[in-house]
């Protein structure tokens, strides 16, 4: 069983797209809005969010926002 990353764990580098997704999520945007803003399918945005949650060790979007803010990503 792999351990979930903690807030202190080193994180993999994030792409500009990842940062844009995090920023839009922090602004309260829905998946549909993010997909329109970034020219991606809603499914792709959903997958990016899931990958970001895994990378930052977040259990949900609220925790993702908190960890991204804590790490200075947004």
Image (tube, rainbow, N blue to C red):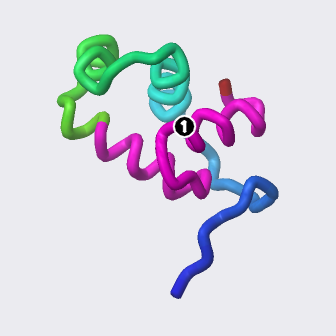
Q: Residue at x 29, y 26 (%)?
A: 31
Question: Could you say which is closer to the camera, residue 63 or residue 71?
Answer: 63
Check if residue 59 falls in the magenta segment.
yes
Residue tagged 1: 62
Can you give x and y, in whole percent of width and height, for residue 28 in the image? Answer: 45, 17
Can you give x and y, in whole percent of width and height, for residue 54 in the image? Answer: 50, 57
* Relative height, residue 19 to residue 8 (above, below): above
Can you give x and y, in whole percent of width and height, for residue 11 in the image? Answer: 68, 55
Q: Residue at x 47, y 24 (%)?
A: 25
Quadrant of the rendering where the C terminus is positioned: top right
Q: In which quarter of the image is residue 7?
A: bottom right
Q: Is residue 64 left or right of residue 39?
A: right
Q: Is residue 70 left or right of residue 54?
A: right
Q: In this view, does 5 lie to the left or right of 61?
A: right
Q: Residue at x 61, y 51 (%)?
A: 56
Can you give x and y, in whole percent of width and height, for residue 12 in the image? Answer: 63, 54
Dot 1 crowding, Cα within 10 Å, few <14, some 14–19, many 20+ = few
Magenta span of residues: 46-73
Q: Quadrant of residue 23?
A: top right
Q: Which residue is drawn at 54% across and 37% down?
A: 62
Check if residue 53 falls in the magenta segment.
yes
SS label for mark 1: helix
Question: Main structural element of the magenta stretch: helix, strand or loop?
Answer: helix
Total marks placed: 1
């Amino acid at each position: 069983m792999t351990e979930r990353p903690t807030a202190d764990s080193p994180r993999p580098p994030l792409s500009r797209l990842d940062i844009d997704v995090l920023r839009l999520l922090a602004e309260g945007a829905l998946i549909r809005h993010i997909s329109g803003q970034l020219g991606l399918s809603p499914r792709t945005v959903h997958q990016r969010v899931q990958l970001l949650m895994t990378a930052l060790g977040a259990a949900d979007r609220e925790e993702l926002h908190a960890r991204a803010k804590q790490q200075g990503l947004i």
